[in-house]
Image (cartoon, helix red, strand yellow):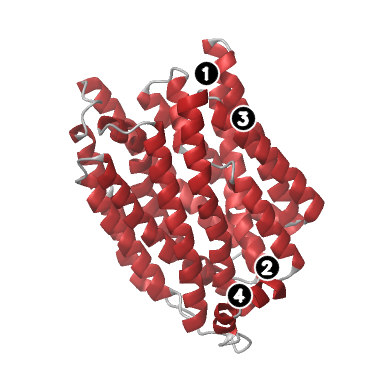
Amino acid sequence: MKIGRTLLIVSVVSLLNDISSEMIYPLMPFFLASLGGGGKVVGLIEGAAGSLSAVIRLASGWFSDLIRRRKELTILGYGGGVAGKILLAIAGAWWVVLVARLIERFGKGIRTSPRDALIADTTAPEDRGKAFGFHQMMDNVGAVIGVVIAYFVLARIAQAGGAGSPDAYRSALWLGVVPAAAALLLLFLVREPASPPEAKPDGALQAFRHPVAAWRSLSPKLRRYLLVVLLFELGNSSNLFLLMRAENLGFAKPDVVLLYLVFNVVAAAAAYQAGHWSDRFGRRRLLIAGYGLYGATYLGFAAAGGLATGASHACIWGLFALYGLYSAFTGGVEKALITDLAPRELRATMLGLHAMVLGLALLPASVLAGALWDWAGPAAPFWLGGVLGVSAACALWKTL
């Protein structure tokens, strides 16, 4: 597959933005702890931010289909991400972190559906899996770079003995703004293709006026898949709980970041190949495998606490690698499946609807995980996530 100009630019933008996000994300549990936030605060912030992003993704996708434009909304969304990261860097209380994350996720909600639709618009149907796999690969490469930076930041903080102070993290938070701003500027080089003649200009407007009829007009496969996604996501809490679980099992803060690095390295290495396999063997097989890997990983995180320290630590290293495979088998493949099944004139809307299902489920999933963590112990949210992951894999095998 030839990598076109638009796909390349959008993928480099994602790489730069993920350098920014992932050098900040591993610091979040520790930054929040220094501001007095515990498990319930982590669940509230991540759940609320993810849910807001989800609702906005649907609205942004619908509006993108209505005006048949992608680039401007994508630029606006990345701009919101930069603003949220600036506010995060100056936060002095956990509720300011909440506001910053809401702004940043608001921006992500605006940009994601139009950006993914832009990739689909400029890619042949037979290459969509590879295209989304390439984009996810670049996204994960950026994450690898960002996590490496976060590791050295945490190692330096630990060496200086300042891990309990929020000021110890601020220089890294400010540094994270730089690649995000560079990504925003690079987007202006994107050339948006003209809408094809077969696109129906009133498709998005009719979906807004008659949402029930629009839902019924979708293919049965797409409707069933979205319902399975909802089941799966109710057990898919924030990744911050994985980092917290590793620390709970005795990993030092810098080593927790190395674990997160393993996840991103595996995801980056496998993403493009997973997309290629989905083009060749079908999206369904990859997604069933991905959901099954998720369930097995979460059950492993739940059971690891019952092992001896050495065995537990070895298990956790392997589980983060498996989690990277889950990400590679699902991230780009899900988007390719949605664009395969969605009507052309509602492509961004359906990508937004899929994202909304993911995000709306993230709030109860993360709040419930935080409550289970505090009230029933750190293993409890992983038992729940593992069971729902395996259930979703079985449901997908039966229904799609």
Gap in angstroms between the C-alphas marked 1 and 4: 49 Å
**Which is in the foreground here, disc 1 or disc 4?**
4
Q: Is residue 356 left or right of residue 50?
A: right
Instruction: Give the residue type that dot 1 points to.
Output: His
- Residue 211: where, in percent of width, then height? 60, 75
Outermost top residue: 308
Instruction: Give the residue type that dot 3 points to.
Output: Trp
Outermost bottom residue: 197
Gap in angstroms between the C-alphas marked 2 and 1: 41 Å
- Residue 355: where, in percent of width, then height? 54, 59
Q: Which residue is mark 3?
A: 383
Q: Which residue is mark 1?
A: 313
Task: Looking at the image, tell me whether mark 4 or mark 3 is earlier in sequence order.
Answer: 4
**Which is in the foreground here, disc 4 or disc 2?**
4
Q: Which residue is mark 2?
A: 340
In this view, 113 is above or below 306: below
- Residue 287: where, in percent of width, then height? 69, 49
Instruction: Give the residue type that dot 2 points to.
Output: Asp
For mark 4, does the 10 Å Cα neighbourhood hold few (<14), some (14 to 19), or many (20 or more) residues?
few
Instruction: Give the residue type that dot 4 points to.
Output: Pro
Badge 1 marks a residue whose secondary structure is: helix
Task: Looking at the image, tell me whether mark 4 or mark 2 is earlier in sequence order.
Answer: 4
Task: Looking at the image, tell me whether mark 1 or mark 4 is earlier in sequence order.
Answer: 4
Outermost right residue: 398
Residue that appears at 40% across and 43% down: 44
The quadrant of the rendering that contains the N terminus is bottom right
For mark 1, does the 10 Å Cα neighbourhood hold few (<14), some (14 to 19), or many (20 or more) residues?
some
Q: Which residue is mark 4?
A: 211
**Residue 7 in sight in this render:** no
For mark 2, does the 10 Å Cα neighbourhood hold few (<14), some (14 to 19), or many (20 or more) residues?
some
Gap in angstroms between the C-alphas marked 4 and 2: 20 Å
